[in-house]
Image (spheres, helix red, strand yellow):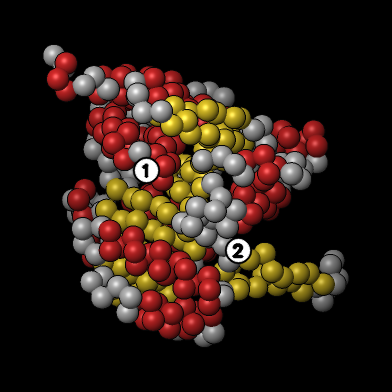
Amino acid sequence: MITYRIATIPGDGIGKEVVPAGQQVLEALAKASKSFAFEFENFDWGGDYYRKHGVMMPADGLDAIRGKDAILFGSAGDPDIPDHITLWGLRLKICQGFDQYANVRPTRILPGIDAPLKRCKPEDLNWVIVRENSEGEYSGVGGRVHQGHPIEAATDVSILTRAGVERIMRFAFRLAQSRPRKLLTVITKSNAQRHAMVMWDEIAVEISKEFPDVKWDKELVDASTARMINRPATLDTIVATNLHADILSDLAAALAGSLGIAPTGNIDPERRFPSMFEPIHGSAFDIMGKGLANPVGTFWSVVMLLEHLGEFDAATRVMQAVEAVTADTSLHTRDLGGTATTAQVTAAVCALLEKSAVPAANAA
Ligand code: IPM
Ligand code: MG
């Protein structure tokens, strides 16, 4: 029996509702399993912690979670604290501190979801966006001078390193290779950004030689938005810089029917540090505390967490339970046009997991 140590960090807003729901699903799985268990430790970092202590997480916070097998994260964002403080003080501190350089964002139209592209069959939209998660536009390099004066100036410098681009390209090619279509699209903007993006393109060509069985193409980021809408089936695995992928993944999630169902993994592929899994949606303060949050984004993130731990059977079972629940429109939350609550959706998924745990030989 393996016991996985999981850190839960609900953070702010509806993170406090969806992370406990995700934990409940993991507990339901473990209850029915003879091969694994979970040991959870919860961390109350985020906006409330900031109000008490002046920081989003303690200075030695990374050490408290360094030994965990994975992190389940909710969201960071607070109406009373500037966004760049909540982001840099918690989520980016963990992503960058643990060098989780590959951000993986699968997008599919799940059963029962009414997606906006009416000409597109659900099977036409099956993408994984790989977001460079350690540098680029999120390097944090820059500054302000002459603050408050008419000559004030400010910079945000995007930095790409050869090592950083090589490792994300290699990760993306490998992921593309593992998927049935073996198809990768490298997003760029090297027509306008003539230094770092040109290096990005050159490195894509170099790394592609290691993966002769992967078919790949290059697309400008602006053109890729139109392609996602007009020719979704021509895309499969997509790799892009931190900011480009940030924008494209919101578009992808909207095209799949709701931001409330989209998951993310912040992965350290070398497994030096724990990886972190979270729903894409933010803290959604407008609906917090009402039990209306869609927990599906967190459940799908739990699927990614289980895959990362190597628990593929369990991951498949959770994904099947999630798909059974989305297929039933009476279990749709408000973001999907329904009236179901977080608790109802969670109970339905847990009930299905308990049922699916019955060994086939004993099943009625
Ligand atoms: C995301 C989010 C974050 C980001 C926000 C909350 C800063 O939009 O995970 O895509 O831009 O990285
Ligand atoms: Mg985003």
20 sits left or right of 90 in the view: left
Q: Which residue is mark 1?
A: 310
Residue 263 locus on image (x, y percent): 42, 44
Q: Secondary structure at mark 1?
A: loop
**Residue at point 21% right, 48% down?**
122
Q: Are marks 1 and 2 in contact (CB under 8 Å)?
A: no
Quarter of the rendering containing residue 60: top right
35 sits left or right of 71 in the view: left
Q: Which residue is mark 2?
A: 138
Residue 182 locus on image (x, y percent): 24, 64
Quadrant into which the N terminus falls: top left
- Whether 289 is drawn above or below 133: the answer is above
**Residue at point 67% right, 64% down?**
140
- In this view, the residue in front, 210 or 294, is 210
- In this view, the residue in front, 61 or 256, is 61
Circle nearer the viewer, 1 or 2: 1
Q: Residues within 10 Å of mark 1 (few under 14, many from 20)?
A: few
Q: Secondary structure at mark 2?
A: strand
Residue 185 locus on image (x, y percent): 33, 69
Instruction: Look at the numbered disc 1 and say if its residue's Cβ is closer than 8 Å to ligand 1.
Output: no
Instruction: Tell me the amino acid under the disc marked 2.
Output: Tyr
Residue 148 locus on image (x, y percent): 85, 66
